[in-house]
């Protein structure tokens, strides 16, 4: 548990082995989603899709 406390003191909230969150990050993700939604997409990137592998989710997803 000492390593967990040290990680928190250094604002590291993800497991160094699996990259999953070590605490509830839902409020952070909500805030990021809001900021992204308010940011205009450059024309050259509109209608592009990327394949993401997210450590937080067990499934794979396409994002636009």
Image: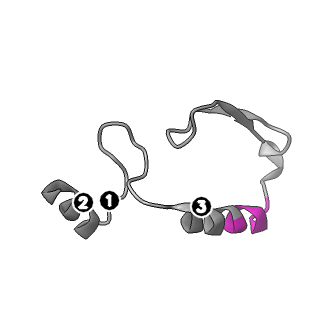
Cα distance in 3D space between marks 2 and 1: 5 Å
Q: Earlier in the sequence, mark 2 or mark 1?
A: 2
Q: Residue at x 29, y 43 (%)?
A: 16
Q: Identify the element where label 2 is drawn.
A: helix
Measured from the top left, where is residue 22 in percent x and y? 38, 54
The quadrant holding residue 3 is: bottom left
Q: Name the element at disc 3.
A: helix
Structural distance between the alpha carbons of marks 3 and 2: 20 Å
Q: Position of residue 15 (x, y in %)?
A: 33, 46
Task: Choose the circle earlier in sequence order: 1 or 3.
Answer: 1
> Tag 1: Cα neighbours inside 10 Å, few (<14), some, or many (≥20)?
some
Q: Which mark is residue 7?
A: 2
Q: Earlier in the sequence, mark 3 or mark 2?
A: 2
> In the figure, is residue 56 to the left or right of 64?
left
Q: Position of residue 33 (x, y in %)?
A: 68, 61
> Majority secondary structure of the magenta segment?
helix
- Residues at badges 2 and 1 in contact (C-beta under 8 Å)? yes
Residue ID for mark 3: 29
Q: Residues within 10 Å of mark 2 (few under 14, many from 20)?
A: some
Task: Decide: few, some or many residues near mark 3? Use Cα within 10 Å; few <14, some 14-19, many ≥20.
Answer: few
User: Which residue bears the numbered disc 1?
Assistant: 12
Q: Is residue 5 magenta?
A: no
The residue under the point 77% across, 44% down is 45
Q: Which residues are magenta?
A: 34-40
């Amino acid at each position: 548990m000492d390593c967990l406390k040290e990680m928190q003191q250094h604002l590291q909230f993800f497991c160094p082995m699996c990259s999953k969150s070590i605490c509830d990050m839902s409020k952070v993700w909500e805030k990021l989603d809001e900021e992204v939604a308010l940011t205009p997409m450059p024309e050259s990137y509109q209608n592009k899709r990327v394949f993401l592998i997210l450590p937080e989710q067990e499934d794979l997803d396409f994002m636009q």
